[in-house]
């Protein structure tokens, strides 16, 4: 499952070292701290492992990922880490699957995904969510002008903004998530979902730190194409909490929503 924009000679974000152990490449470097991993490709890897585990257990069973919720328990150095998968609630039509990423024996990310059976609802499918402008209608945006870190330098972004905290944009990764393994469109697109917090800033990251504590994506359709689209709004409350909310799109229209809880901390001079 390759995509046209991927550089076949580029290093992947991760290299598998065993069934549960992975080594990140420097291109996973984060924006808040260059020595730590950006959570975005980690979310993509976790999605891939959950769906791979599903396929190993169910074969051709049509269970799709309807929701992925990740809690970020701590920072992740650019060092090897482990991911363990377990089925919390098994079933033939509905399953709840959990993934825990650990580094040095310390849990760093805890994720849960609902997998639900596909049924034929093609004759009633639709959404009242308006579509965003297409990729070709939006100008290129150099995210590294706002953010540091190796990961954002690997992204292709097209974006427009109508003001602080509001933006519509499309993102695609220009490196493979893993090599030697087929990666689904769901996992590949979720590998850039976390970039929403930072693509529609309400305040400058030079003045205020606003890392997200979690990420929850709800998907009502399997994504298609190579770009993930966002219609994002950011809110900050009066006591250090914030929220980044996005409607997610692909080439065929809206596919779901994304929410990220922010801890907002003014930088002191």
Image: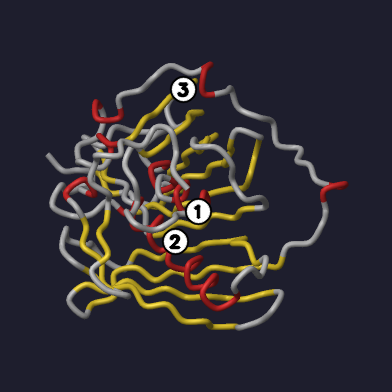
How many neighbours does mark 3 have within 10 angstroms: few (below 14), some (14-19), or many (20 or more)? some
- Marks 3 and 1: in contact by CB < 8 Å? no
Q: Earlier in the sequence, mark 1 or mark 3?
A: 3
Q: Residue 252's spot in the image, x, y percent?
A: 66, 34
How many neighbours does mark 1 have within 10 angstroms: few (below 14), some (14-19), or many (20 or more)? some
Report the side of 223 relative to 207 (left or right). right
The vertical placement of 88 against 268, above or below, is: below
Q: Earlier in the sequence, mark 3 or mark 2?
A: 2
The secondary element bearing badge 3 is classed as: strand
**CA separation, marks 1 and 3?**
30 Å
Front disc: 1 or 3: 1
Q: Residue 129's spot in the image, x, y percent?
A: 70, 36
Q: Foreground: 187 or 197?
A: 187
Q: Residue at x 34, y 54 (%)?
A: 263
**CA separation, marks 3 and 2?**
31 Å
Q: Residue at x 39, y 58 (%)?
A: 181
Label 3, on which residue? 161
Report the side of 259 relative to 254 (left or right). left
Q: Residue 215's spot in the image, x, y percent?
A: 45, 56
Q: Residue 261's spot in the image, x, y percent?
A: 43, 54
Q: Earlier in the sequence, mark 1 or mark 2?
A: 2
Looking at the rendered image, the quarter that the C terminus falls into is top left
Label 1, on which residue? 184
Label 2, on which residue? 48
How many neighbours does mark 2 have within 10 angstroms: few (below 14), some (14-19), or many (20 or more)? many
- Marks 2 and 1: in contact by CB < 8 Å? yes
The secondary element bearing badge 1 is classed as: loop
Q: Foreground: 42 or 51?
A: 51
């Amino acid at each position: 499952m390759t995509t046209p924009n991927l550089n076949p000679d580029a290093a992947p974000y991760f290299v598998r070292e065993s069934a549960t152990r992975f080594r990140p490449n420097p291109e996973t470097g984060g924006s808040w701290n260059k020595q730590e991993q950006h959570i975005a490709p980690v979310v993509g890897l976790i999605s891939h492992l959950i769906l791979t585990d599903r396929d190993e257990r169910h074969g051709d069973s049509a269970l799709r990922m309807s929701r992925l919720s990740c809690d970020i328990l701590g920072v992740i150095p650019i060092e090897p880490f482990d991911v363990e998968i377990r089925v919390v609630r098994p079933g033939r039509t509905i399953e709840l699957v959990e993934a825990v990423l650990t580094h040095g024996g310390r849990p760093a990310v805890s994720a849960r995904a609902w997998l639900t059976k596909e049924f034929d609802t093609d004759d009633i499918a639709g959404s009242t969510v308006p579509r965003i402008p297409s990729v070709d209608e939006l100008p290129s945006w150099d995210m590294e002008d706002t953010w540091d870190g190796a990961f954002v330098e690997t992204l292709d972004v097209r974006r427009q903004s109508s003001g602080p905290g509001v933006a519509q944009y499309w993102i695609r990764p220009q490196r493979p998530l893993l090599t030697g393994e087929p990666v689904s469109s769901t996992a590949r697109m979720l590998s850039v979902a976390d970039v929403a917090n930072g693509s529609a800033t309400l305040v400058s990251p030079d003045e205020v730190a606003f890392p997200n504590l979690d990420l929850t994506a709800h998907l009502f359709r399997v994504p298609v194409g190579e770009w993930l689209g966002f219609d994002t709004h950011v809110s900050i409350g009066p006591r250090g909490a914030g929220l980044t909310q996005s409607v997610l799109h692909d080439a065929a229209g809206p596919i779901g929503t994304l929410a990220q809880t922010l801890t907002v901390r003014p930088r002191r001079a």
